[in-house]
Image (cartoon, helix red, strand yellow):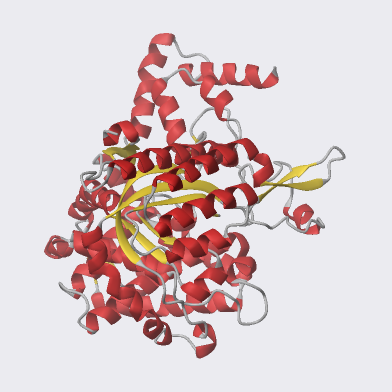
Amino acid sequence: MRTLSYFVLLSLLVLSCKPKASQEEATVRVPDRIDTLLSKYATVELTADLATLTDNEQSVVKLLIEAASIMDQLFWFEAYGKRDSLLTGITDERMQAFVRINYGPYDRLDNNRPFLPGVGPKAAGANFYPPDMTKPEFEAATLADKASLYTFVRRDEAGKLKTIPYREMFKEEVDKAAKLLEQAASLTENAGFKKYLTMRAQALRTDDYQASDFAWMDMKDNHLDIVIGPIETYEDQLFGYKAAHEAYVLIKDMEWSQRLARYGAFLPELQRGLPVPDAYKREMPGSDGDLNAYDVVYYAGDCNSGSKTIAINLPNDEAVQLQRGTRRLQLKNAMRAKFDKIMVPIADMLITPDQRQHITFDAFFANTMFHEVAHGLGIKNTINKKGTVREALKEHASALEEGKADVLGLYMIKQLFDKGELTGELDDYYITFMAGIFRSVRFGASSAHGKANMIRFNFFQDYGAFTRLDDGTYRVNVPKLEEAMAALSQKILTLQGDGDYTGVAQLVAKQGVVGEQLQADLDRLKTAGIPVDIVFKQGADVLGL
């Protein structure tokens, strides 16, 4: 009864904005505010050329989309926990739409600030932990699987902490998704994809994903793909332990994939050339990974919340990475939408005119691609017996890993360009990279990617890698950018290898923030009506299936 009353009150507050406002004032004010919030996103239809798919493959795509949509339900629970009561209490359809984009009442492109009245701050641990649990209480609890990627932490009847495996919390939902994957497996003719779908179905039921990760790595000639399950730990900003559910349904672009295939072979050589002592690069990345281009036709769950992913580097399992490497999936159609609708307009406002000719889609694609490839470089285990980097750095691990991939991706571009493996001008990659920072920092500094963006921006600024001119545009200083790239690479790799939690926390606190001048420039982009990110019209009906 209390919950119902609260959301009835919330609905009235949303409609009236403030207690003494008239209904006439409310009908003007609320839509204006909602329009401003929704204008952060440009709407894009997720389509692809289905002419190359057989009838069976088209049927498989429909099944995969249905399975993926279940991940949406699970992520809602992980992110907020009260989806139905929240949406029922809101009568304005546009406000409902914005809630759905954010999977809750917190604006993911505004540092997770609540956008509904009466809503408190977003819990750092989302819905993975009890809202009243403290860090010391968690750390003192003697629960063997408390730090597992795949358990919720709850209280028992006596108020003590306990764990609930995902497979139990979501038993009905994961079984339904697993059956859909098995049905898709029965239709596919590709042996590798059939094996992966079957094993991934089993993984959803058991919370044991490693075997299916290896099966996913084995696929080489599959035309269709799906990434599905609890994968990234960004939503858990308390410890960074808990994986959130998501899914992508994908169709491989065979022509572009052939063009990209050769780059993975350079990883061992690039690892040896990293600008750190040998101890920090002693792990040799697996070389069995693929680099492919896809059209994505469906997003669900974590990857669909707030800013949208345009490239994937998986699996996250360190053992799989060391043995086999990773697969890097470039989501070409989503990437093109962001470039056309967001990147080019930003460059036209913030990059000095004589450098704008260096803003190219090929460079944007390459920068994004090598960011993902660079996740395979560096070190996964600390050099001083503090466990994995992820365990040692806790909630800061994801932000530092994203920062590493940013600068090492640029390092890879320089090395491969010098070898004659990349076309165009080197300035294309550097200046497009700089414009890309302005695009990315607009996501805010609350997420792992957001913190990484700001650390990079502030570090590069301190090095003189770019200069803000009197006309409000920025000029890239290429030699200084290369110096900053090497210095930040060394700093991040050393922090990771040392498992230096305190050092990383200090770096994030000092440089993971948006300064006043930058915020003023970002506000100019907002005033100009340039969207921050994209949101999708998607599904089997959009594809014409």
Please give left or right for residue 29 compared with residue 5 in the image. left
Q: Position of residue 129 (x, y in %)?
A: 69, 45
Q: Would residue 215 be found to the left or right of residue 330 on screen?
A: right
Residue at (51%, 29%) from the top-left corner? 116
Q: Nearer the viewer, residue 446 or 387?
A: 387
The residue that appears at 64% across and 69% down in the rendered structure is 392
In the picture, measured across the screen, residue 351 lies left or right of residue 206, that is left
Instruction: Give the residue drawn at x 43%, y 75%.
Output: 488
In the displayed image of the protein, which residue is found farthest to the right? 158
**Residue 302 visible in the picture:** no
Q: Measuring 73% from the left and 42% from the top, which residue is drawn there? A: 132
Q: In the picture, residue 506 is in which quadrant? A: bottom right
| Image quarter of the C terminus | top left
Q: Is residue 338 above or below residue 4?
A: below
Q: Quadrant of the N terminus?
A: top right
Number of dots carrying numbers = 0
Residue 292, x across and y down, in percent: 31, 62
